[in-house]
Image (tube, rainbow, N blue to C red):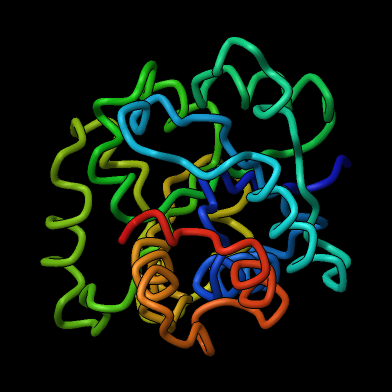
Amino acid sequence: MGWRIAVYGGTFDPLHEGHLQVAEAILDAFALDRLLLVPAAVPPHKRRQAISSPYHRMAMLALATADRPRIFISTIELESPARPYTIETMGKLQAIYPDGQLLFVMGGDSFRDVTTWREYQRILTEYDVIVATRPGYPTAATEEEEGMAGMAGHLAPELRSRVVNLLGGRRPSPEQLADRHIFLTDYVAVDVSATDVRQAAATGRSLSGMVPPAIAEYIAKYQLYRSLL
């Protein structure tokens, strides 16, 4: 049986503690062999936004993951001149790992907008999808139905039927992992965003607790995000 590999794409501008907490929690909860961080050159939905150099973003990813043996960085999108869409990247990675089971990781905000993505139905049906929500989503059992309706209500019924609610820190069962599903999770407890980090860096505030120390030092050394002032 092939490896079980999570694919966690994003701008990572910069990588922060929330990203790392999600990655480690998913590796553990889903019994994965490895997790690939896939920095985007310029994400299709962010082409009008200013994005830091891919070299800086790649360097920060390398600094933060050097001592994490199951977290790897894939440059597949940085090396693609065509600025691929997610479905294209997943297809290329499946060709690299033909016997592997790929699980696509996305944030709660992206999941709400997923119906605007190219061929999103294929992403949600051809691969397991792990939705990593930030703090604030309902987690109690009494809120389960409300949480499901709020988070997956934008999907067509046939896609909603694939949703598995793991809110409340629950783990998937072997039976659930045996078939493709959309897993709603809330493993991350750090309420931080890349926007928060960029704004803090722009005003010279401490980044302690927001990013790993190595990334904080890198941001300060190269004076990243100062242009936001």
226 or 207: nearer the eye? 226
Residue 4 in the image: above or below residue 173: above
Rendering quarter of residue 66: bottom right
Count the numbered circles shown: 0
Give x and y (percent) for residue 74.
Answer: 76, 39
Comparing 9 with 127, the one in front is 9
Instruction: State whether residue 85 is above or below residue 184.
Output: above
The residue that appears at 61% across and 76% down in the rendered structure is: 216
> Along the line of sight, which residue is nearer the eye, 206 or 65?
206
Q: Is residue 224 left or right of residue 155?
A: right
> In the figure, 218 relative to 60: above or below?
below
Among the 4 quarters of the image, the one containing residue 90: top right
Query: Residue 41's spot in the image, x, y percent?
Result: 57, 30
**Horizontal relation, residue 78 to residue 95: left or right:** left
- The quadrant of the image that shows the C terminus is bottom left
Whole-percent x and y of residue 54? 64, 39
Residue at image location 54% in from the left, 59% down from the top:
224
> Residue at (44%, 72%) from the top-left corner?
201
